[in-house]
Image (spheres, grey):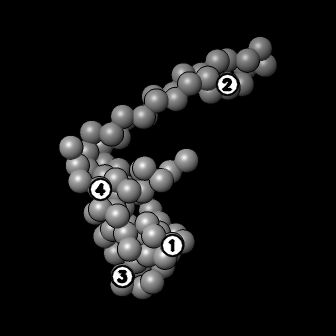
Amino acid sequence: MQKVHIPTGEPAGRIACQQCGNAKHFVEIAENVLVTTHYLQNTDGSFTPEDNTTEIFGEVKFLCGKCGADLTRFHAHFLEMSF
């Protein structure tokens, strides 16, 4: 089980980059990802996606969206707070 690092920003738990102060823009990068999408072909020949699954087989990084600082230690907290 991975330990969740809780950021100390205000309000409690808010992530802020310690290098540039950014508290709004973040990037999640996943390596070796398999995306499978099932489509339905319409009568006019166009396609509509019906279902989509994503499997991540590699490393996942969580970065500051402004300066690119590595915030991966907060990734588990980010996942818990994503709605």
Marked residue nearer the N-terminal end (1 or 3): 1
Of 19 and 5, which appears nearest the observer? 5
Q: Which residue is mark 1?
A: 11
- Of the residues shown, which amino acid type is indicated by label 3? Gln
Q: Secondary structure at mark 1?
A: loop
Marked residue nearer the N-terminal end (4 or 2): 4
Q: Which residue is mark 2?
A: 47
- Of the residues shown, which amino acid type is indicated by label 2? Phe
- Seen at 42% across and 85% down, the residue is 20
Distance, label 3 to label 4, CA atoms, is 18 Å
Q: Position of residue 35 (x, y in %)?
A: 43, 34
Q: Which residue is mark 4?
A: 4
Query: In the image, which disc is placed on residue 18?
Result: 3
Q: Are marks 1 and 4 in contact (CB under 8 Å)?
A: no
Q: Residue furthest top?
A: 43
- Seen at 29% across and 56% down, the residue is 4
- Of the residues shown, which amino acid type is indicated by label 1? Pro
Q: Are marks 1 and 2 in contact (CB under 8 Å)?
A: no
Distance, label 4 to label 2, CA atoms, is 41 Å
Distance, label 1 to label 2, CA atoms, is 45 Å
Marked residue nearer the N-terminal end (1 or 4): 4
Residue 27 drawn above or below residue 48: below
User: What is the crowding at mark 1: few (fewer than 14 residues within 10 Å), some, or many (at least 20)?
Assistant: few
Q: Secondary structure at mark 2?
A: strand
Marked residue nearer the N-terminal end (3 or 2): 3
- Seen at 42% across and 50% down, the residue is 79
Q: Secondary structure at mark 3?
A: loop
Of 24 and 7, which appears nearest the observer? 7
Marked residue nearer the N-terminal end (3 or 4): 4
Q: Are marks 3 and 2 in contact (CB under 8 Å)?
A: no
